[in-house]
Amino acid sequence: MEKAVDMPIAEAEKEKSQFVKNSVLYKEFLAEREEILKHKWIESEKAGKDIGFERALLDWIVKHRSNWRERRRREARTEQAAS
């Protein structure tokens, strides 16, 4: 009987989770995180050691974030114009 009660809650959580995963904001977060991880790898290779996520994050924000965001906006506008 307990499972019957839990099913709607589990389904609601699954739908909420899917909504978040499909949101533009979440997709942008994932894309930005991927860029930070790439930056971390590159800078760690240059340093000859793992520089850590926080250092990579701060360095990427200072050096690359604004250009990256602007490029993403331009690409999104181009895609919208094409469709």
Image (cartoon, rainbow, N blue to C red):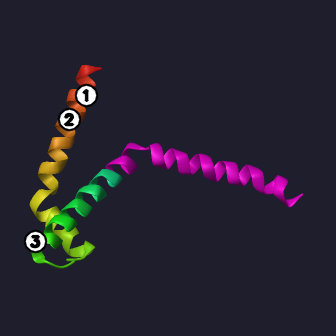
The foreground one among 71 and 44 is: 44
Mark drawn on residue 75 = 2
As drawn, which residue projects farthest toward the right?
Answer: 1
Residue 46 horizontal/vertical position (percent): 10, 71
**SS at mark 3?**
helix
Mark 3, Cα crowd under 10 Å, few <14 / some 14-19 / many 20+, is few
**Residue at coordinates 24% horizontally, 34% vertically from top-left?**
76
Mark drawn on residue 79 = 1
Residue type marked 2: Glu
Q: Earlier in the sequence, mark 3 or mark 1?
A: 3
Mark drawn on residue 55 = none
Mark 1 touches mark 2? (CB < 8 Å) = yes
- Considering only vertical position in the picture, is 42 above or below 15? below
**SS at mark 1?**
helix
Confirm whether the magenta stretch covers residue 12.
yes
**Residue at coordinates 18% horizontally, 63% vertically from top-left?**
39
Mark 1, Cα crowd under 10 Å, few <14 / some 14-19 / many 20+, is few
Which stretch appears magenta? 1-28
Task: Check the picture and name the quadrant holding the C terminus.
Answer: top left
**Cα distance between the residues tagged 1 and 2:** 6 Å
Task: Check the picture and name the quadrant holding the N terminus.
Answer: bottom right
Mark drawn on residue 46 = 3
